Structure formats: structure tokens, C-alpha cells
Amino acid sequence: MNATLERHDFLRSRRSVRRFHQEPLDPEVVERMLRTASSASSAHNRQPWRFAVVSTATARTRLAETMATAFRRDLEADGTAPEKIQAVVERSRARIESAPVAIVVCMDTTEMDMYPDARRAEAEQTMAVQSTANAATTLLLAAHAEGLGAVWNCGPLFAPDAVISALDLPTTWEPQALVLIGKPAEVPPERTRKSMTAVSRFL
């Protein structure tokens, strides 16, 4: 097969893995993935991403419990049945605690440009979010390159203060996502993707 096609096949073979073996990850591997993630493109090259690497069981449990409390509160406010709340919250907690490494991807906008008008200020904020998301996506691909499994979780967006408190993060770090990484215990099959005609226009 053509080498270029092989590279595309590799990129497309990434899956969202939610079940991991308990084997810890080599710190050098984790650092290598973060270096690759930090090579992502960013607006003005400001690199607003920040990574909180949660690799100890104690810290993961603290994060999982704090997020579970916030998750439970929101579901109760929604009027969700207690038994469903318990099942959903426990599943979320178990996923965080079972991953050898949990990386909270944060955004720090203190070095972004400042504008006096709301229109440009909003655009600058969006650029920071997009830049941070670029790094998170590159982190997922870096994990895939290491033969590891990973999954993107947006839970921190719903409980940013709880995450900052649980991990004692700087207040300028805005939690955007939680990436769970480890050796996959189960790799899910490919999910259906929308057709190119549904998502593209060629002009």
C-alpha cells in the first residue's frame, strides 16, 4: 500500500477507548505525548493549553469524587430518577479511577490579545478554545501513536471550579476536557461517520 495511504489509515484507526488495563504508564511516554500535543497549531502561537497530569490513584479518586458530586447535583436538578443518577455517576467515577493516567486539558487566556469591544473579545476567546482543542486532539493522536487507548471527556466543562479545587490548579487554568489514557482493555469497533457530501462543500 502507498505510504501516504497507510498513514491516513493509521490516523483513521484511532478509537475512543473507555476500558483500560491497570498497568501504569512510563512517565517518559506521558511526557513524549505532551510534547507532541504541544506542537499543535495555536492562534498567534500563544499556546494557551495547560495540562494537569493526574497519575496517582489518590489524585484520580479525588478528581472522580469531586466531579461525581457536581454531576449528581446537576442530574438531581434535572429531575432524573435516583436509580439512573446512581448508575450514571458511578460509571463516570469508575472510568476516571480505572484509567492509569487522566489529563485535564485546560486553557489559560492570560497571554491572548485583549480587545475593548465584545465582538473581537469573543473571537479571541473562541480562538483560545480552538487552540486548546487542537492540542487535545493531538494528544489523542499521540496516545494512538504510542499504541495506547484514549478518550475525550467534556465533564470538566460542567464543573470547572470543582476540578480546579480538587487538583489545586491555578485559577487562570480553565478546565476544558479530560483525556483518559492507558493500555486498552477493549477497542470498540469503528462508528458510523457522516458522508463527505453531508459535511463538505467544494466551491
Image: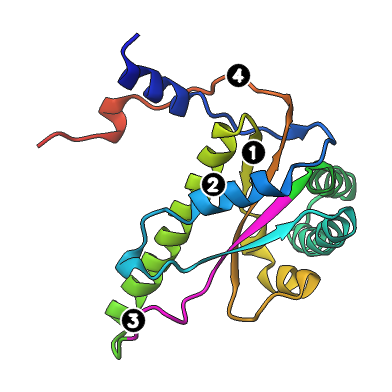
Instruction: Identify the residue shown where x is 65% and y is 44%.
Output: 29
Q: Which residue is mark 2?
A: 139
Residue type for callout 3: Asp
Q: Secondary structure at mark 4?
A: loop
Instruction: Identify the residue shown where x is 54% and y is 47%.
Output: 139
State the extent of the magenta-drawn residues as a range. Answer: 102-114
* Image location (x, y in percent) of residue 197: 26, 26
Separation of marks 4 and 3 at Cα, in angstroms: 42 Å
Q: Which residue is mark 1?
A: 150
Report the quarter where the N terminus lies: top left
Residue type for callout 1: Ala
Q: Which residue is mark 4?
A: 189
Mark whose residue sits in front, 1 or 4: 1
- Lower sequence index among marks 1 and 2: 2
Image side of residue 117 versus residue 163, left or right: left
Separation of marks 1 and 3 at Cα, in angstroms: 32 Å
Instruction: Mark 2: give few (<14), some (14-19) or many (20+) Cα within 10 Å.
Output: many
